[in-house]
Image (cartoon, coloured by chain):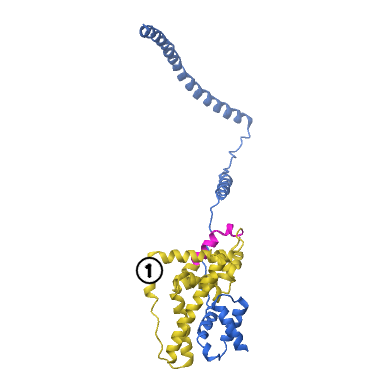
Chain colours: A yellow, B blue
Amino acid sequence: MTQGEFLNIVMPFKDKVFRLAKRLLVSTEEAEDATQEVLLKLWNNKKKMQEYKNVEAFSMTMTKNFCFDKLKSKQAQNLKIVHSNYEDGNTSLQKQVELNDSVDWVSKIIEELPEQQKMIIQLRDIEEYDFDEIAKMLEMNNTAVRVNLSRARKTIREKLTKTHNYGVK
Amino acid sequence: MVLNNIENLLEKYENGETTLKEEQQLKHYFSQETVAPHLEMYKPMFTYFLGNQQEQFTKDIPLKTKRTFNYKWIAVAAVAVLMLGFYFNQQPNDVGTIEDPQLAFNEVSKALEMISTHFNKGTSTVGYLNEVNKGTATLGYLNEIENTTNIIFKN
């Protein structure tokens, strides 16, 4: 397989790999490194790639596992502190800024979710995969995906309602 | 009516029962400028989802093509070097010819004479080989010694 062919396969989902990595690792740099790593691994195993039925799903699973390894390793422990420096910009009165703030809130809320739910929200609501694909990527069964998704969505809504009301009152 | 529909969808959405198409509808609805006041809190959520889809991986991928060294090229290079060697090593073999037959005869006989004298010198030293043969012949007596020692040790 040539570089060109490989890139043709990889290009459509490299952003998705990156976004999933970012969802899990929070830091953009870390996510970029993770994406590179995952794509390189794919490239090095390019001979086996033809055997995989769904390269995209396989890559997502790889990304998940890679990020979990990263999170487990000690060096990632420090990152959590570094990247929780969110601005608390509630003082702004402009509607647009307020909206931006609440969008930031969403990202913060998602960040607080358990890893599993984070990934499911990412894959379903942002990447718009169907349940079977998500189940395959995360190596779970279909109902578990639904249950976790529902829980995650409810949590997000509850927290958003709280902050929203807080803003209004 | 539309609002009713959206509310229904939202409930289904929270239970994880919406299809991708229905979720698209929700996203579309909440990307509008104005939404129903009591649903306002959903707006940032869907805006965030839509916004996050745009994020891209901009770093390039350093694809290293693994260079597997092929040993057959060593063979090719060696052959090339050999060929070049032969090509440049062809020294002029022409040492000239002697036109006059008498002179040529003299030259040849001179050369042959030189060969024969050197040859004889060599053969005279071969004579010493006889001494060596004599020596090996006496070694035969060693067998006798071995026989006797065998007899001794047997008893």
Q: Residue B94's x, y, as percent?
A: 60, 40
* Residue nearest the viewer, comparing B123 with A58: A58
User: Circle 1 sits in a helix, a strand or a loop, which is it?
Assistant: helix
- Give the residue at x 52% y 63%: A40
- Give the residue at x 47% y 77%: A110
- Residues drawn in magenta: A36-50
Give the tally of numbered discs.
1
Instruction: Inspect the magenta stretch and tell me whether residue A44 lies in it.
Output: yes
Which quadrant does the N terminus of chain A fall into? bottom right
* Residue nearest the viewer, comparing A156 with B152: A156
Q: Residue B131's x, y, as percent?
A: 43, 14
Which quadrant does the C terminus of chain A fall into? bottom left
Q: Amino acid at mark 1?
A: Gln
Q: Main secondary structure of the magenta part?
A: helix
Residue assigned mark 1: A77
Instruction: Inspect the magenta stretch and tell me whether residue B72 lies in it.
Output: no
* Residue nearest the viewer, comparing A115 with A19: A115
User: In this image, A155 relative to A10: left or right?
Assistant: left
* Residue nearest the viewer, comparing B39 with A110: B39
What's the chain of the residue with tag 1? Answer: A
Q: Residue A115's x, y, as percent?
A: 46, 70
On screen, A144 above or below A167?
Answer: above
